[in-house]
């Protein structure tokens, strides 16, 4: 099946566009259902509007906090305008509305998009069941239609629940597309910084891979160079007049699952400070671990937290903030929020200067370590790792003899769970023989357990000592050095 022509102004998203193209261009009879989700600002609406423009499809974006009757009226007007029918199409209930949407595909294959779908369900809890009945396999209206009904929303917890467990629409969807954030390499190209990996990494530490932050929030404005990075942060991130300034607060406020956002912010702040375990988070905010279980689950469902399993200890995991801007906000902005809001000449610059140690330890370090794991997962060659990566995690290796724990930033296992490599990632340090010796000690501990890693990986955002480079050259590939250039362009 041929893919639809890809819009010239679309950056990347080749795979997502191909999946949508296949779904909407399928000429077979019978209405079908697709679900598109992902965090806000990732370009879901751009994709869906583009596919409707290319195919002459129907696109409708629901309005927040609109009662059922008004939503039906608005949808009827949109259908009337699309179909070019005289007068106004009136839907008395959602059964009529969904049948009306299926009727749009009576004569040709047509995508029918309901964007911001959670807004519609908020005042019409039965809507998923209505759609389930409308798409019943033996229902005549479904069989006569070639509508490709696409439900889209940014509430990950809600959209994921549409097709899970005992949900009415489970088993009905022919497409379940999650639109992700750009990884660090895609983000560098998108921001036009691929030729400057250090600057690309610094920008990624702050705004991550969310495309709308560049296109809609900052109108494409990026730092002109490394020397311009601090000014860019001050003027476009820490500035109360910038759309990015309150973005993290809006992210939480917009998700209907996140009530009492103050406590959720407190939990995220605790994680940003380095409290990664459930008990550590609870202790930091002076709550019992059982009291925050629900909040952690909700933040996971919302896609803001993820529990990464420990590479070496079963049934143990650590929480990680998924969005760099959320980490940046809680580490840098929230502690100085009142001062930042009260703009004074030179004060924001002083705050940013004062926050540099926290930026390096609480923002740059953890995000860089995650970038190194992504590199192993998605870009490192089999020659580099010794085999294809099956999973890449971090963890702690305990030395029983000395009763100490050794943190491992990168642990790569193959598809058969065999440990391929362990690694250490240092954003701000020139890495030398001491770092290699530490990795060798950890490797020896693992070998004593029967898990000897074949490769030792050393990552640095600054560079490597000559003695370490010589040792790596003599290691016949066992010691791999990964600087920023290799991280962004090599394998």
Image (spheres, rainbow, N blue to C red):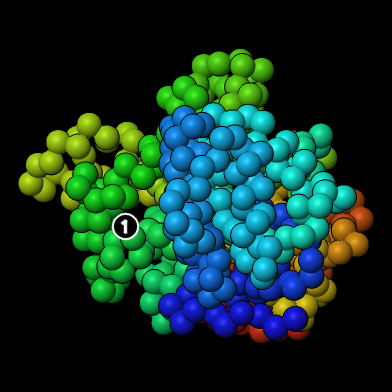
Instruction: Identify the residue at horizontal 61%, vertical 79% (top origin).
Output: 4
Res 375 visible: no
Asked whether, in this view, residue 220 is left or right of residue 104, the answer is left
Q: Is residue 127 above or below residue 285?
A: below
Instruction: Identify the residue at horizontal 49%, vertical 79% (top origin).
Output: 7
Asked whether, in this view, residue 56 is left or right of residue 237, the answer is right
> For residue 378, which quarter of the picture?
bottom right
Instruction: Identify the residue at horizontal 85%, vertical 51% (top origin).
Output: 137
Asked whether, in this view, residue 259 is left or right of residue 32, the answer is left
The N terminus is located in which quarter? bottom right
Q: Position of residue 301 (x, y in %)?
A: 63, 38
The C terminus is located in which quarter? bottom right
Asked whether, in this view, residue 334 is left or right of residue 428, the answer is left
Q: Position of residue 323 (x, y in %)?
A: 50, 50
Residue farthest to the left, as pictured: 345
Q: Looking at this view, is 139 or 401 the one in front? A: 139
Instruction: Identify the residue at horizontal 48%, vertical 54% (top origin).
Output: 80
Task: Say which residue label 1 marks.
Answer: 217
> For residue 218, which quarter of the picture?
bottom left
Q: Residues within 10 Å of mark 1 (few under 14, many from 20)?
A: some
């Amino acid at each position: 099946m041929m893919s639809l022509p890809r819009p010239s102004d679309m950056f990347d998203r080749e795979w997502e566009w191909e999946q949508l193209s296949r779904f909407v261009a399928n000429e077979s009879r019978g209405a079908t259902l697709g679900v598109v989700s992902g965090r806000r600002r990732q370009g879901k609406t751009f994709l869906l509007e583009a596919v409707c423009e290319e195919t002459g499809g129907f696109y409708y974006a629901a309005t927040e906090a609109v009662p059922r009757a008004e939503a039906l009226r608005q949808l009827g007007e949109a259908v009337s305008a699309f179909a070019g029918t005289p007068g106004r199409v009136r839907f008395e209930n959602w059964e009529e509305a969904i049948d009306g949407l299926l009727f749009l595909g009576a004569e040709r294959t047509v995508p029918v998009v309901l964007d911001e779908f959670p807004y519609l369900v908020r005042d019409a809890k039965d809507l998923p069941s209505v759609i389930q009945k409308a798409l019943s396999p033996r229902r005549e209206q479904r069989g006569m239609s070639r509508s490709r009904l696409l439900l889209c929303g940014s509430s990950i917890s809600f959209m994921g629940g549409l097709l899970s467990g005992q949900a009415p629409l489970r088993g009905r969807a022919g497409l379940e597309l999650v639109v992700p954030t750009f990884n660090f390499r895609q983000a560098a190209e998108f921001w036009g910084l691929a030729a400057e990996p250090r600057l690309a990494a610094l920008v990624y530490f702050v705004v991550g891979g969310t495309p709308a932050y560049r296109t809609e929030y900052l109108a494409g404005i990026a730092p002109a160079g490394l020397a311009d990075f601090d000014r860019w942060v001050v003027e476009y991130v820490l500035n109360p007049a910038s759309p990015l300034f309150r973005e993290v607060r809006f992210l939480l406020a917009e998700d209907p699952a996140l009530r009492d956002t103050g406590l959720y912010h407190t939990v995220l702040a605790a994680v940003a400070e380095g409290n990664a375990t459930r008990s550590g988070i609870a202790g930091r905010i002076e709550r019992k671990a059982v009291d925050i279980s629900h909040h952690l689950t909700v933040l996971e469902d919302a896609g803001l937290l993820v529990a990464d399993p420990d590479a070496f200890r079963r049934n143990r995991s650590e929480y990680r903030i998924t969005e760099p801007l959320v980490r940046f906000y809680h580490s840098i902005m929230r502690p100085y929020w009142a001062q930042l809001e009260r703009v004074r000449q030179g004060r924001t610059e002083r705050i940013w200067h004062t926050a540099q140690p926290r930026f390096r330890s609480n923002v740059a370090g953890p995000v860089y370590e995650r970038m190194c794991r992504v590199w192993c997962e998605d870009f490192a060659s089999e020659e580099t790792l010794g085999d294809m990566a099956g999973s890449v995690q971090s963890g702690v290796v305990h030395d029983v003899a000395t009763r100490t724990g050794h943190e491992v930033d990168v642990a790569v296992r193959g598809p058969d769970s065999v440990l391929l490599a362990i690694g250490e990632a240092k954003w701000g340090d020139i890495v030398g023989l001491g770092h290699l010796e530490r990795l060798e000690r950890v490797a020896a501990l693992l070998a004593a357990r029967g898990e000897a890693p074949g490769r030792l990986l050393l990552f640095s955002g600054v560079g490597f000592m000559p003695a370490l480079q010589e040792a790596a050259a003599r290691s016949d590939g066992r010691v791999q050095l990964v600087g920023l250039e290799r991280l962004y362009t090599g394998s």
